[in-house]
C-alpha cells in the first residue's frame, strides 16, 4: 500500500549568520506497509518518526528516494495533482487541542473534508457526519454535533479528529501519537476504537508512537527508529518479547509496568540525550549511547537491516554475528 | 512520624456554571521520606489539591476548608506573609505541570534555579550560584548548563532544571505534578530514576501527581486514587497494585497496555462527571460495571479493608474488618 | 461565528470601560446620522465657508449661557425676519407697507450691531422707498435709515426685480446715514453734540440704545424698542419679499461663534460624521489590506513573503508627515487623499504583526491537518487562519480608528485640512491661527479639542473592554 525506497530527508538549518547545517532527519529508510496492516513506528522524539509519517502523506518532499502509494509515485507530484491522493490518505494528529479548529463546532469539523472534496449534497453530508460520529461513539450525535471543541474532553476531541479523518473513507491513515496527550485511562478506549474501525474499513495504518507498549497492542509490525534510521523491525511478538537491538531492549525497559516493587529498583534506561542529528556521524548512530562491547565497525560504518529471524530485521554489527 | 496530615480538605471554585467542587473532603497523611502517589483522570481535582497545599489559589475561590498539618503545625492558620516566608518553597516546593515550558527564555537557567534562594536574602549571590551548580550536577546535568538559556535545552533537560529549582531551599516535601507528562518514555524513565535516587538519598517526602497509575509504581510507597474530587481508594503500593478493591482502581490498572500480559487493555467507558453537580450516591456509579442497589442512592463511606487500606465502594462493605 | 459575536458583546458589556465605550459610540452614531440627514451635502463649501451667511452673527462671541455665570448681562442676538407685513395701507398712488418688530432689550449693554436685510423686491415704475424707524422705550423716535431701491437700468423690462438672488444687507451700525441721523437725534433730544466721526468710532448702537449722561457716556436704556420699517410702493403690483432686522448680541448660541461669526455648534456638529467617516474608513481599509497581506505573507511564504515584507519595511520607514505635506501641496488638500495616504502608511504595522501570528499558527497541527484533508490554500487562509486572528484584527481596527482621527486632526492643525469638509481639527486650527489661545477664545479652542479626545477615547474604551477577548489570559475568573 505504502512503500518507501531509500528515503532521505535533510533539513537546512541556519546556524549563526552564514553557516547552514544539514540535519539528517531521515537518512535512508526503506519500508513498506501491506494493505490493511498496521506498522508501528517507535522511537524517541527527534528520531525522525514524525518526519517519516509526514513524508508518506507528502506533507514533506523527500530530499532523496521515492514514496509510492499503491503504484503511484507521489514523490514529485504537484499539490494540484495530489487531491485524489489527499482523499485516500488521512492523518490523526497528536494534539487534539491544536489540530482541530477551535471556532468550528463538531459537525462543521467533521463535515469539512466532504466540502473540500465536494462530496454529496447537504443532506447526504449530514447523514455521513452522523454516521462518522456514531463510528467514533460520540453519541448522541445530535448533541455532540453542536458542541465546540472547548466543551469536549481530550479523548472526545481525539474522537472528533478520528471521525474527520475517517469520513472520506481513506485507505491509508497516519496516526501520530494519537493518545500521548490523553489521560492514561482513556488511552485504551481510543486505541480500541481505532483498531475496531481499522478492521471494519480495512485501513492501512502507520502508527507513530514513543510508547512501545501501545505499539505492541496495535500493530502488525513494529519498526524501531533511532536518529533517522530504522534499527529493528519485525512482528510485535518478536520485537517486544525477543528484542535484539540494544536500543530496543532499553526502550522496552523504560516502559512502566504497574508493579509495587518498581520503586526499589532503577530502570535500565538509555542514558543521556540522543545525539544531535546535525553532527556528522560515520558509524552506527547508536554507538555513543550503546553499552555493549563495541567493535571497530561500530565507529566507522553504518549497519544495515539484516534478517536475523524470519520477518525480524535488525541493524547492528554485534548481532549480525549472533546469527552466524 | 507523620510529616504531613491533610484533614477533610475542601476546595470549591465559583464558576459561571455554579460551584465546582474540585476537592471535596480529602484526608491524607504522609510520613517522612515517603512518596505518596495521587492518581486521577484530568478533572478529578488532583492539581487543585496540590495548589491548595501550596496555597496558590485562583481568585474565584469559593470554599477553602480543612486542616493541613505540617510537622504538627496547622499551616492553614498561617497568614499569607508567614506562609510565604516559612512554607512555600522552604518547606514545600513544587514542580508544576508543564513547568518546563515556564522557564524564562531570557534568563540563564542557573540563575533561575538560584532565584528562590536569592529572594531569601540570607545568602549572597555567589553561594546561591554555587548551590545552583551543585544541584545541576545532582540532577545529572553538566555544570555548563548553568549558563545556558531555556531554548537550548531539550524537554528532559528542562524538566531536570525544574526539579533542581524545586530542591534549592532543601524542602521537606516536594509536590510533583505530572513531571513527565510531555516526555518520551525513555526520558520519563530517566527522570523517574532520578526522583527515586533523591527520595532515597536526600530524605525528602514527595507527592507525585499523575494520571498514569503504572508510572506511580515507580516511585510511590502509598497511593491515593482520586475520582471527582474524592479519594475513592488509598493504601500502600503493595495493597493498591496487589489487591485493588475499588472497581475504578481495578479498571485503571486494567487499562494499561502492558508489555508482559497479552490481554488487550480494558477501558472505562464514559467521562468523569461534572464537578458542579456530582452524581448522587457513589460518584463512580454511572461508569461502574458492578453497580448494584445502594450505589446511586447512598454515597459509600470509606471502608477499612485492612491497615492503611481504605476503599469507598459498597462492594467492600463486607470486607470491613 | 454568531456565537462569537454574541460573546464579544456580552464580554464588552460586562466591563465598565466597554459599557461607557458602547454608550459613547451609540451617541456618536446617532449624532452623525442626524447631521447627515439634516445638513445639506455641500455644507462645507456653500455654507460653512460662505461669510455672507454668517454676517448677522456676532463675531467671536462666547456662548450665551456664559450670562448665567456673570452679573453683567450681555446682549444676545435677536433676529426678526418676516415676509408678511404687519400692516398694509393702500393709498391712491402710494401703498404703505409696515413691518413692526418689538425688541425687548434687557442686557446691560447695547446690541453689538444692528442690521437690516431686505430681499426680493419687485416694482413696475418708480422704485420703492424703505424707511427704518426706531421708537425707544422713552418714547423718542429716530428715523435711522432710508433705502431707495436702485432704479431701472436702461433697456430693463418690467417688473424690475431687485435683491432677488442675494438679499441686500445694510449694516446699520456703521452706516453714515444712520450716524448722522443719530447725531441729529442726540442734539435735538438731549442737546448733546457729538461729531459724526466720533459717533462712528464709539458706535451708534450705544447712542440708539442708551441715554447720554453728564460725563459724556451713555447709560443703557432697557425696555421695549419698537422697530418699524415703512415701505412706500408706487404701484399696486409692487411687492417686498422679506425684511429682516437683527440686533446683534455679544454672546451667541450654545457654543459661541468664531471671528467670522460662524456658529461653532453647527461646525462642531458637522465634525461628528466627518470624524467617524475618517476613522472608520481609514481603519477598516487599513485592516483589510494589512490582514490579508499579513496572512498571505505568513502562510504562502517564499518570495511573496519577502516582497510583502520589503514593501512593508519601506512604507514604515518613510516619514509620513513630510509626504503628506508634500502631497497636499501638489494635489491640494483633499480628505480622500489624506485617508488614502493614512492607509498606505498604516497597513505595514498590522501586516508585520499578523504575519508573525500566522507563522505561529502555520506551524501548528491545524494547518497540517487541513492540508492532509486536501484543503486549498485559500480555504486554509480564510476558514482556519483568519478566524484565529480575527479578534486581534478587530481590536486593531478599533485601536486604529482613533489614530486615523487624530492624524487627520493633526494634519488639519497644520493647515492641510480639506476646506470642503470642516473637521474639528480645522476649527481648532482656525481658532489657533486667529490667536484664540492668546485672546482667550476658550469656547473656540476647547470644544473641538475635547470632542477629538472623547471620540478617540470612545474607541480606546471599547478596545479596553475587548481586551479579555483578545487576550484570554486576562479573563477575570471563569
Image: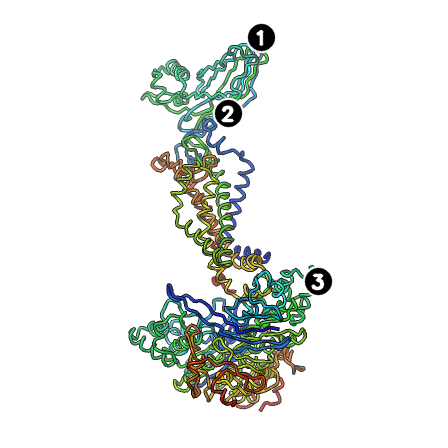
Q: How is the image coloured?
A: rainbow
Compared with A201, B262 (above or below) is below
Q: Label 2, on which residue?
A: C80
Tag 2 subunit: C
Distance CA(mark 3)–CA(mark 2)? 78 Å
Which one is earlier in the sequence, the residue at label 2 or at label 1?
2
| CB atoms of marks 3 and 2 within 8 Å | no
A272 or C387, which lies in front? Answer: A272
Q: Label 1, on which residue?
A: C92
Q: Mark 3 Cα within 10 Å, few/some/many (few <14, many 20+)?
A: few
Q: Is residue B92 left or right of B255 when viewed as pictured? A: left
Distance CA(mark 2)–CA(mark 1)? 30 Å
A286 or C123, which lies in front? Answer: A286
Q: Mark 2 Cα within 10 Å, few/some/many (few <14, many 20+)?
A: some
Q: Secondary structure at mark 3?
A: helix
Q: Mark 1 Cα within 10 Å, few/some/many (few <14, many 20+)?
A: few
Residue C181 figure quarter = top left
Q: Report whether residue B289 is seen.
A: yes
| CB atoms of marks 3 and 1 within 8 Å | no
Q: Secondary structure at mark 1?
A: loop
Q: Report whether residue C443 is seen.
A: no
Compared with C442, B210 (above or below) is below
Quadrant position of the N terminus of chain B in the picture:
bottom left
B88 or A278, which lies in front? Answer: A278
- Report the mark closest to the observer, 3 or 1: 3
Residue B174 is situated, as x and y percent measured from the top left of the image, at 43, 79
Q: Label 3, on which residue?
A: A124
Distance CA(mark 3)–CA(mark 1)? 97 Å
Tag 1 subunit: C
Q: Residue furthest top?
A: C92
Amino acid at each position: 500500500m505504502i512503500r518507501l525506497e531509500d528515503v532521505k530527508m535533510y533539513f537546512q538549518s541556519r546556524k549563526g549568520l552564514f553557516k547552514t547545517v544539514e540535519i539528517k532527519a531521515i537518512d535512508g529508510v526503506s519500508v513498506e506497509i501491506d494493505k490493511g496492516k498496521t506498522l508501528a513506528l517507535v522511537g524517541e522524539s527527534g528520531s525522525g518518526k514524525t518526519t517519516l509519517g509526514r513524508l508518506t502523506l507528502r506533507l514533506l518532499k523527500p530530499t532523496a528516494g521515492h514514496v509510492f502509494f499503491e503504484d503511484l509515485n507521489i514523490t514529485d507530484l504537484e499539490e494540484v495533482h495530489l487531491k485524489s491522493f489527499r482523499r485516500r490518505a488521512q492523518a490523526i494528529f497528536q494534539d487534539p487541542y491544536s489540530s482541530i479548529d477551535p471556532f468550528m463546532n463538531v459537525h462543521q469539523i467533521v463535515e469539512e473534508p466532504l466540502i473540500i472534496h465536494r462530496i454529496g449534497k447537504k443532506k447526504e453530508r449530514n447523514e455521513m457526519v452522523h454516521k462518522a460520529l456514531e463510528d467514533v461513539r460520540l453519541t448522541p450525535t445530535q448533541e455532540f454535533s453542536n458542541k465546540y471543541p472547548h466543551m469536549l474532553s481530550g479523548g472526545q476531541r481525539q474522537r472528533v479528529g478520528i471521525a474527520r479523518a475517517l469520513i472520506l473513507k481513506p485507505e491509508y491513515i497516519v496516526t501520530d501519537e494519537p493518545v500521548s496527550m490523553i489521560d492514561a485511562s482513556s488511552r485504551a478506549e481510543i486505541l480500541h476504537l481505532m483498531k475496531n474501525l481499522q478492521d471494519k474499513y480495512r485501513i492501512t495504518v502507520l502508527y507513530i508512537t514513543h510508547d512501545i507498549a501501545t505499539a505492541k497492542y496495535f500493530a502488525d509490525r513494529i519498526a524501531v527508529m533511532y536518529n533517522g534510521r530504522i534499527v529493528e523491525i519485525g512482528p510485535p511478538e518478536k520485537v517486544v518479547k525477543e528484542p535484539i537491538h540494544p536500543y530496543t531492549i532499553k526502550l522496552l525497559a523504560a516502559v512502566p509496568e504497574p508493579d509495587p516493587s518498581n520503586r526499589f529498583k532503577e530502570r535500565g534506561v538509555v542514558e543521556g540525550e540522543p545525539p544531535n542529528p546535525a553532527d556528522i556521524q560515520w558509524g552506527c548512530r547508536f554507538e555513543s549511547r550503546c553499552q555493549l562491547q563495541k567493535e571497530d565497525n561500530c565507529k566507522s560504518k553504518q549497519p544495515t537491516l539484516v534478517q536475523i529471524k524470519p520477518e525480524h530485521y535488525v541493524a547492528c554489527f554485534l548481532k549480525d554475528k549472533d546469527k552466524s | 512520624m507523620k510529616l504531613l496530615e491533610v484533614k477533610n480538605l475542601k476546595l470549591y471554585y465559583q464558576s459561571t456554571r455554579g460551584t465546582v467542587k474540585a476537592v471535596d473532603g480529602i484526608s491524607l497523611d504522609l510520613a517522612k521520606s515517603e512518596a505518596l502517589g495521587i492518581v486521577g483522570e484530568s478533572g478529578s481535582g488532583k492539581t487543585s489539591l496540590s495548589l491548595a497545599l501550596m496555597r496558590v489559589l485562583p481568585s474565584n475561590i469559593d470554599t477553602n476548608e480543612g486542616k493541613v498539618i505540617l510537622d504538627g503545625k496547622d499551616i492553614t492558620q498561617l497568614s499569607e506573609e508567614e506562609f510565604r516566608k516559612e512554607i512555600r518553597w522552604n518547606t514545600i516546593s513544587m514542580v508544576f505541570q508543564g513547568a518546563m515550558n515556564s522557564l524564562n527564555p531570557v534568563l540563564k537557567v542557573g540563575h533561575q534555579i538560584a532565584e528562590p534562594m536569592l529572594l531569601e536574602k540570607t545568602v549572597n549571590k555567589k553561594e546561591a550560584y554555587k548551590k545552583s551548580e551543585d544541584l545541576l550536577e545532582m540532577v545529572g546535568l553538566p555544570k555548563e548548563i548553568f549558563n545556558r538559556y531555556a531554548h537550548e535545552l531539550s524537554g528532559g533537560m528542562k524538566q531536570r532544571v525544574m526539579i533542581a529549582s524545586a530542591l534549592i531551599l532543601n524542602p521537606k516535601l516536594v509536590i510533583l505534578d505530572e513531571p513527565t507528562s510531555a516526555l518520551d518514555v525513555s526520558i520519563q524513565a530517566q527522570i523517574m530514576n532520578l526522583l527515586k535516587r533523591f527520595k532515597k538519598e536526600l530524605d525528602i517526602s514527595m507527592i507525585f501527581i499523575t494520571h498514569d497509575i503504572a508510572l506511580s509504581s515507580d516511585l510511590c510507597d502509598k497511593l491515593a486514587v482520586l475520582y471527582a474530587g474524592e479519594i475513592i481508594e488509598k493504601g500502600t503500593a503493595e495493597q493498591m497494585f496487589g489487591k485493588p478493591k475499588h472497581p475504578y482502581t481495578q479498571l485503571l490498572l486494567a487499562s494499561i497496555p502492558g508489555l508482559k500480559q497479552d490481554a488487550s487493555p480494558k477501558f472505562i467507558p464514559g467521562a468523569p462527571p461534572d464537578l458542579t453537580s456530582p452524581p448522587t450516591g457513589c460518584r463512580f456509579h454511572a461508569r461502574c460495571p458492578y453497580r448494584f442497589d445502594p450505589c446511586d442512592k447512598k454515597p459509600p463511606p470509606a471502608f477499612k479493608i485492612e491497615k492503611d487500606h481504605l476503599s469507598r465502594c459498597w462492594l467492600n462493605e463486607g470486607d470491613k474488618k | 461565528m454568531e456565537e462569537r459575536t454574541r460573546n464579544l458583546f456580552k464580554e464588552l458589556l460586562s466591563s465598565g470601560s466597554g459599557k461607557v465605550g458602547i454608550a459613547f459610540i451609540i451617541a456618536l452614531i446617532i449624532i452623525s446620522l442626524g447631521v447627515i440627514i439634516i445638513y445639506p451635502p455641500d455644507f462645507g463649501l456653500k455654507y460653512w465657508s460662505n461669510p455672507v451667511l454668517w454676517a448677522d452673527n456676532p463675531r467671536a462671541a462666547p456662548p450665551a449661557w456664559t450670562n448665567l455665570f456673570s452679573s453683567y448681562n450681555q446682549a444676545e442676538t435677536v433676529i426678526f425676519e418676516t415676509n408678511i407685513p404687519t400692516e398694509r395701507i393702500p393709498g391712491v398712488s402710494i401703498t404703505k407697507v409696515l413691518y413692526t418688530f418689538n425688541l425687548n432689550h434687557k442686557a446691560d449693554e447695547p446690541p453689538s450691531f444692528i442690521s437690516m436685510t431686505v430681499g426680493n423686491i419687485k416694482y413696475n415704475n418708480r422704485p420703492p422707498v424703505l424707511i427704518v424707524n426706531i421708537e425707544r422705550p422713552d418714547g423718542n423716535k429716530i428715523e435711522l435709515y432710508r433705502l431707495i431701491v436702485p432704479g431701472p437700468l436702461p433697456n430693463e423690462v418690467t417688473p424690475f426685480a431687485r435683491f432677488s438672488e442675494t438679499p441686500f444687507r445694510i449694516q446699520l451700525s456703521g452706516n453714515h446715514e444712520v450716524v448722522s441721523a443719530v447725531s441729529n437725534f442726540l442734539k435735538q433730544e438731549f442737546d448733546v453734540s457729538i461729531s459724526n466721526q466720533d459717533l462712528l468710532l464709539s458706535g451708534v448702537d450705544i447712542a440708539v440704545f442708551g441715554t447720554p449722561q453728564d460725563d459724556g457716556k451713555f447709560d443703557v436704556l432697557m425696555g421695549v424698542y419698537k422697530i418699524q420699517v415703512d415701505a412706500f410702493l408706487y404701484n399696486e403690483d409692487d411687492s417686498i419679499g422679506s425684511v429682516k432686522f437683527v440686533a446683534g448680541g455679544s454672546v451667541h448660541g450654545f457654543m459661541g461663534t468664531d471671528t467670522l461669526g460662524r456658529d461653532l455648534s453647527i461646525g462642531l456638529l458637522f465634525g461628528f460624521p466627518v470624524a467617524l467617516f475618517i476613522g472608520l474608513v481609514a481603519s477598516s481599509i487599513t485592516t483589510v489590506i494589512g490582514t490579508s497581506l499579513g496572512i498571505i505573507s505568513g502562510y504562502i511564504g517564499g518570495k511573496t513573503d519577502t516582497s510583502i515584507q520589503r514593501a512593508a519595511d519601506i512604507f514604515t520607514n518613510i516619514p509620513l508627515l513630510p509626504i503628506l505635506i508634500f502631497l497636499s501641496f501638489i494635489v491640494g488638500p483633499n480628505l480622500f487623499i489624506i485617508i488614502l495616504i493614512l492607509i498606505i502608511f498604516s497597513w505595514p504595522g498590522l501586516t508585520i504583526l499578523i504575519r508573525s501570528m500566522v507563522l505561529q499558527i502555520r506551524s501548528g497541527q491545524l494547518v497540517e491537518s487541513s492540508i492532509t484533508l486536501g484543503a486549498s490554500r485559500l480555504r486554509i487562509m480564510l476558514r482556519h487562519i483568519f478566524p484565529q486572528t480575527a479578534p486581534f484584527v478587530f481590536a486593531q481596527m478599533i485601536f486604529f480608528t482613533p489614530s486615523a482621527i487624530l492624524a487627520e486632526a493633526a494634519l488639519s492643525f497644520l493647515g492641510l485640512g480639506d476646506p470642503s469638509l470642516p473637521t474639528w481639527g480645522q476649527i481648532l486650527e482656525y481658532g489657533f491661527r486667529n490667536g484664540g489661545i492668546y485672546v482667550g477664545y476658550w469656547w473656540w479652542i476647547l470644544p473641538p479639542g475635547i470632542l477629538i479626545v472623547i471620540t478617540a477615547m470612545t474607541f480606546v474604551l471599547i478596545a479596553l473592554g475587548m481586551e479579555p477577548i483578545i487576550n484570554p489570559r486576562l479573563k477575570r475568573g471563569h
